[in-house]
Image: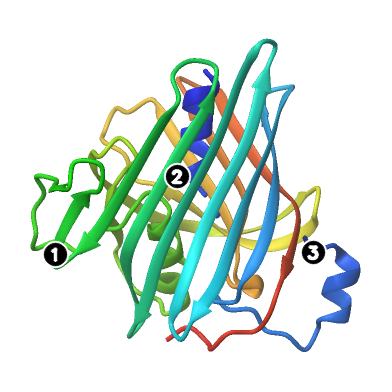
Amino acid sequence: MLNKISALISTGLVFLNMAVIANSHAITPTPLTPFNAQYEISKGRLTLGTAKSQLSQIGENSYTLSYFSNLSLLILSDRRRETSELVIKDGQIQTKRYLFKREGTGSDKSTQLEFKNSEVIDIETDKPLELDNTIAWFDEISYQLQLKLDLTNQVTPLKYYLVNHKKQDKLYEFEIVGEEQIKVPAGTFNTIKIVRVRDEGSSRKTETWLAPEYGYMMIRIRQEKDGSEQLDAQLEKFVFNQISPKAN
């Protein structure tokens, strides 16, 4: 179960308290402002652990987006790390490399992918995956940053083709359902709420709340299946590390 919950968080997804916000009132974060964020993960009344998301700028228009999670339930454990190396050009993300590692109960797993010349290469085998090379592919976390950029620039539709850590191709599409003020451990935020578009008749529901005033920082993500909550990740604390060029 933890295996599935960890995967849900990272694809949803990746420490500022309110005093830091007050001292940084002159800062206007964009989706490209480097940050560290921590989330409290639960399922119903069960607290499972934490997840962290981090964006770092490593050069002009070059970034790394990382995700870490550490979950446990009774004797089960699941620890994950994902890192996406990417560049930004004309408001579009170009993924360069994706690294995934999972440890804990059951088998340890890892994936390394290189995005090069319209191909996605499995670094372990040094062979390209069988994918449509006319599509600009994202990895399992880089699409989240493109989503923030698209919301900032009012780009539609919110549709993203990605390769996940299992080396499978997926299509994620989202729609905006409205504005909502929500309260989480980090405080109260004005957000927009988006939902993932799924096939008709699907029993799954994914809701995400993002804060435009904070560069569309993810404030909460919640998932249901057959009416039962599968995961609830709520922002616990976050910090903006420096100011980068505005999203374009």
Give me the disc on residue 65: none
Mark nearer the N terminus (2 vs 3):
2
What percent of the width, then of the height, locates residue 246?
A: 53, 87
Q: For residue 175, what is the image quadrant?
A: bottom left
What percent of the width, then of the height, locates residue 125?
A: 19, 41
Q: Do the residues labelled 2 and 3 touch (CB within 8 Å)?
A: no
Q: In the image, is 121 to the left or to the right of 160?
A: left
Q: Which of 55 and 31 is in front in this view?
A: 55
Q: Seen from this angle, which residue lies furthest right?
A: 19
What percent of the width, then of the height, locates residue 30?
A: 57, 78
Q: Distance between the residues labelled 2 and 1?
A: 23 Å
Q: Which of 226 and 187 is in front in this view?
A: 187
Amino acid on which the number 3 mark rests in the picture: Leu
Q: Which of marks 1 and 3 is in front?
A: 1
Q: Can residue 183 be seen in this view?
A: yes
The residue that label 2 is drawn on is 11
Count of marks placed on residues = 3
Secondary-structure class at tag 2: loop
Amino acid on which the number 1 mark rests in the picture: Ser
Give me the disc on residue 16: 3
Badge 1: residue crowd in 10 Å (few <14, some 14–19, many ≥20): some
Q: Report the residue at 37% width, 75% height from top.
A: 87
Mark nearer the N terminus (1 vs 3):
3
Q: Report the residue at 60% width, 76% height from top.
A: 33
Badge 3: residue crowd in 10 Å (few <14, some 14–19, many ≥20): some
Secondary-structure class at tag 3: loop
Amino acid on which the number 2 mark rests in the picture: Thr
Badge 2: residue crowd in 10 Å (few <14, some 14–19, many ≥20): some
Q: Which of marks 2 and 1 is in front?
A: 1
Vertically, is 200 above or below 90?
Answer: above
The residue that label 1 is drawn on is 118
Q: How far apart are marks 2 and 3 (CA)?
A: 23 Å
